[in-house]
Amino acid sequence: MDDRLPTHLWVMAHIRSADAQGVPMMVVRKGDPSRGTVILKLNRLDRTFTVLVQARDGEKLFWSRGTGPDPVTEADADAYIARQTRYDPDVWVIEIEDRQGRHWFEGAIR
């Protein structure tokens, strides 16, 4: 049995938590409300972006660097996200504006 929260509740909880700390986080694209995978678009507010993709190792959540180890332009980040949403129409896309590049969700970046 899977005891994880539905995606929409999990995402909204993180948005509220970030908002309480003054970090803008918004849903750019809603996916499947129950089990949609999440993609994070990290906007460092210096015209560079990192895209992180939710993944699991068994039950352990982690984030993979969809656009590689170095920050990319917004056009490159958006192109990557567009390819992923064509492949998986149930995916959620969350944009986070954080100068430090923090993703605010649990799970390490691998």
Image: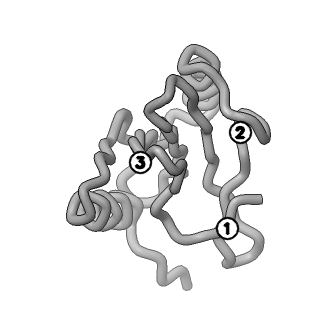
First-in-chain label (2 vs 3): 3
The amino acid type, in three-letter code, at marker 3 is Asp
Q: Position of residue 18 (x, y in %)?
A: 31, 61
- Please tell me which residue lies in front, 3 or 67: 67
For the residues labelled 1 and 2, say whether their Cβ atoms are less than 8 Å apart: no
The answer to which quarter of the image holds residue 11 is bottom left
First-in-chain label (1 vs 2): 2
Q: Position of residue 36 (x, y in %)?
A: 48, 51
> Which quadrant of the figure contains the N terminus?
bottom right
Helix, strand or loop status at disc 2? loop
Name the residue: 61% across, 37% down.
Answer: 50
Disc 3 or disc 1, which is closer to the eye? 1
Color scheme of the displayed model:
one colour
For the residues labelled 2 and 3, say whether their Cβ atoms are less than 8 Å apart: no
Disc 2 or disc 3, which is closer to the eye? 2
- Asked if 61 appears above or below 72 in the picture, the reply is below
Residue count near mark 2 (Cα–Cα under 10 Å), binned few <14, some 14–19, many ≥20: some
- Please tell me which residue lies in front, 95 or 84: 95
Helix, strand or loop status at disc 1? strand
Checking the image for residue 32, the label placed there is: 3
Q: Position of residue 89 (x, y in %)?
A: 51, 33
**What's the CA distance linking mark 1 and mark 2?**
14 Å
Checking the image for residue 4, the label placed there is: none
Checking the image for residue 66, the label placed there is: 2
Q: Is 2 on the left or on the right of 68, as rendered? A: left
Residue count near mark 1 (Cα–Cα under 10 Å), binned few <14, some 14–19, many ≥20: few
For the residues labelled 3 and 1, say whether their Cβ atoms are less than 8 Å apart: no
The amino acid type, in three-letter code, at marker 2 is Gly
Residue count near mark 3 (Cα–Cα under 10 Å), binned few <14, some 14–19, many ≥20: some
Name the residue: 34% across, 63% down.
Answer: 14
Q: Which residue is mark 1?
A: 108
